[in-house]
Image (tube, rainbow, N blue to C red):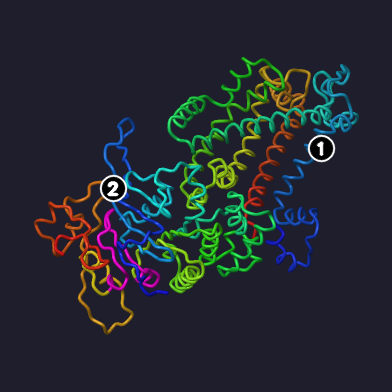
Amino acid sequence: MTEPAQTSVGTGEAPLLDIVNLKKHFPVKKGFLSRGVSKVYAVDGISFHINQGETLGLVGESGCGKSTVGRTVLRLLDPTEGSIKLNGRDITHLNKADMRPVRREMQIIFQDPYSSLNPRMSAGDIVEELLIVHGIGTAPERKQRVAELFERVGLRKAQMNSFPHEFSGGQRQRIGIARALALNPQVIIGDEPVSALDVSIQAQVINLLMDLQAELNLSYLFIAHDLAVVEHISHRIAVMYLGKIVEYTDKKTLFTNPQHPYTEALLSAVPIPDPTIKRKKTILQGDVPSPIQPPSGCHFHTRCPYAEAQCKIDVPVLKAYGPGHMVSCHLR
Amino acid sequence: MVDIDHHAELAKAGAHVTTRWDRVLFYASRYPLGAIGAVIMIVFVFSAVFADVLAPKDPVQTLASASLHAPGGDFLMGADMMGRDMLSRIIHGARISLTVGVASILLGGSIGVIIGLMSGYLLGWFDLLMQRLIDIMQALPLLVLALVMAASLGPSLENTVIAISIPLVPNVARVVRSSTLSLREMPFVEAARAAGMSELRVALRHVLPNILAPLIVLFTAQLGAAILVEASLSFLGLGVPEPHPSWGRMLSESAAEYVRVAPWLVIFPGLAISLAVFGTNLFGDALRDVLDPRQRN
């Protein structure tokens, strides 16, 4: 299950979800009367694809735009540029009504299991509402389906009548998963679905997600900042820095042969649960620069230990380094 | 749904929730103050509905010989200057005061909720326009605004309700708008959108139920204000016209002239107003908690 997919980056096989040159810029309003003068370059031209039954991990520091990617792909935010294709169909510019049937195919699991469930609705109603909105089944059929979903995600049927506050964080996240599964989607976007949970609960939820993938042939876009979690669940991984993908390859290559200095730094920050192992550490200095005024040239040059003169001037492009291995760095 | 939350606890107490009545008793024992509030409100509503049967005398019948009759004997709460029975007038007054209070809260409240929800939802020019309008309305005191409205509409029960409800709109709209602004960014609202729900459904099913708590508190607090504004309007001859008895007018008319010679003319209507306001506040607080699933265990 956790073995890397046989397909590699950029093969000819038609992907389930295909994102090309996606951009999302937010205007920043300076004052009461002025027009939006500057922009936040939250997502600045990223491309990736996800195949059926595959998990793409999207990692990066907070503020690098990874959650914006998830929301834009779901069309909760309108992309500034680029295209989103699901099953070969361009959904970038569909209006609300046309998006509705598409939403059956794509669902989301949120980071915070506390604010992502309406506190005034019972757990069963929260899941059932999606079926009602999409006109699926009669009332008893829907109840039956919700009961099945509850059991599938490891909750008891009797808990359908309980309210969100009566559940623990992990159980709430299971309700969130049941909700995401209700419409039988093909793609689920997990926006840091385990980062708010205890480590022991994280493992349970990750395993549940992997079981569901095996059973239902789901595709995941798994957004996270924790490489250890991403390593466990992903087939391929895209590393994001300040709105751009800097390295994009299969899991094994990324962990054994990282090419981008940023990936290298991220990997060296993953703790190894063995105090006797010594290793070379690359510790990044400073913070992520502001996405309102990203640095010139390579966005990473301000923190890169290997930066050269060229890095400050030329913008690197994501180019093939090896088979199925894309890196955006002048030095490679 | 509700009884599942309490079954365990009730079983512990040896009780069995089987009927609706049991559930009412359960909540009453859980929120005794709310129960007191509910009883007060039931008494007032009951006397308003059955005023014709309950009142011992005709509330508008004058009797010169009973002018300023002290409480006791034939007149349990005394009689006013024109010899009208205070008890009967207070019982009938419940009808006017509660109708005006509740109707203006419902009217003003629903307009406020609609404006607030739309403002917080649509934003843009609609929000800007509405908020400036509300600024203008809030710059004037409630009574002044109601006065202007009542004066231009003319005295009648319906016009009094309208005159009182319109000035209530800004408060409600502001509270609803600010809650909507924070709720619309919540992940569960985002989840509803991701599921393809219409904005109307999101607003009514996901936003509105979550602003109930501040709304109930606001409504019960405003009910008292509405009864008092009605009193002032009636005093100025712009409210419910004579000879219909309204608590407010009874209080304000006699407060000026007879408070020293016949204090019962002030005490009893004042008591009725205070009790009604007190009762709704107690009941409102308990209702807010009962309706909130988080408070139920």
Q: Which mark is residue A144?
A: none
Q: Kindly report the distance in space between the C-alpha atoms of the residues bearing marks 2 and 1.
A: 64 Å
**B146 versus A242 height, above or below:** above
B77 or B118, which lies in front? B118
What residue sits right under mark 1 in the picture?
Answer: B46
| Image quadrant containing the N terminus of chain A | bottom left
Task: Give residue A258's quadrant in the image.
Answer: bottom left
User: SS of the residue at dot 2?
Assistant: strand
Q: Amino acid at mark 1?
A: Phe
In the rendered view, does B283 fall on the left or right side of A287? right
The chain containing the residue under callout 2 comes to: A
Placement of A277 over or under B106, stated as above or below: below
Q: Quadrant of residue B37?
A: top right
Q: Amino acid at mark 2?
A: Tyr
Q: Is residue B47 above or below residue B152?
A: below
Instruction: Return the chain for callout 1.
Output: B
Q: Quadrant of the C terminus of chain A?
A: bottom left
The residue shown at (25%, 68%) is A323
Q: Residue furthest bottom?
A: A276
Residue A122 in picture, x, y percent from top left: 62, 57
Query: Measuring 51% from the left and 70% from the top, which residue is drawn there?
Result: A215
Q: Position of residue A48 (x, y in %)?
A: 33, 58
Q: Is residue A254 magenta?
A: yes
Asked if residue B226 is among those painted magenta in the image, a careful observer would answer no
The reply, left or right, for residue A209 in relation to residue B80 is: left
The 10 Å Cα crowd at callout 2, few under 14, some 14 to 19, many 20 or more, is many
Q: Which residues are magenta?
A: A228-255
Residue corresponding to mark 2: A41
